[in-house]
Image (cartoon, rainbow, N blue to C red):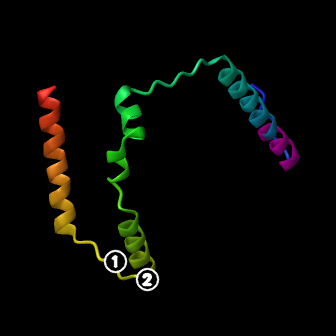
Amino acid sequence: MKINRTSPGRTELAAGVAQKKIERADDSKKGAATKNEHVHLSTLSSGARTSDASASIVDAAKVAEIKQAISEGRFKVNSDVVADRLLETVKELIQNKRST
């Protein structure tokens, strides 16, 4: 077994790395061109988009107020409330999953 005592210079290393990047880019382009990608929106998501109820879920004035408080450093997070609401949400999700 012969060991080459010379190490490649920076130019050769950079050229090798650049070539590998080009090869990977070519491979990803080929893969992207052959894939058939489809998106399916359920009737539930379509209904949520057009529903007037979805528009009332977000209170734009409240969001603006919270953004302002955050930017001014006045917004305080009540970790007890966050934890309680998170637990409530998880309980609801578990109950909904059991009923389906």
| Magenta-drawn segment | 10-17
Q: Which residue is nearer to you in this view: 24 or 74?
A: 74
Disc 1 residue type?
Phe
Residue pointed to by mark 1: 75
Q: Which residue is drawn at 32% across and 53% down?
A: 57
The picture quadrant where one finds residue 47 is top left
Q: Residue at x 41, y 32 (%)?
A: 46
Instruction: Indicate the quadrant containing the N terminus: top left, top right, bottom left or bottom right.
Output: top right
The x, y position of residue 36, in whole percent, is: 59, 17
Q: Is the magenta stretch mostly helix, strand or loop?
A: helix
Judged from the image, the secondary structure of the residue bearing numbered disc 2 is helix
Queried whether the magenta region covers residue 11, the answer comes back as: yes
**Pointers 1 and 2 in contact (CB under 8 A)?**
yes
For residue 33, above or below residue 11: above
Disc 2 residue type?
Glu
Q: How crowded is mark 2: few (under 14 residues within 10 Å), some or many (20 or more)?
A: few
Q: Can residue 7 be seen in this view?
A: no
Queried whether the magenta region covers residue 52, the answer comes back as: no
Q: Is residue 40 visible?
A: yes
Q: In this view, does 48 lie to the left or right of 39?
A: left
The x, y position of residue 88, in whole percent, is: 14, 51
Residue pointed to by mark 2: 72
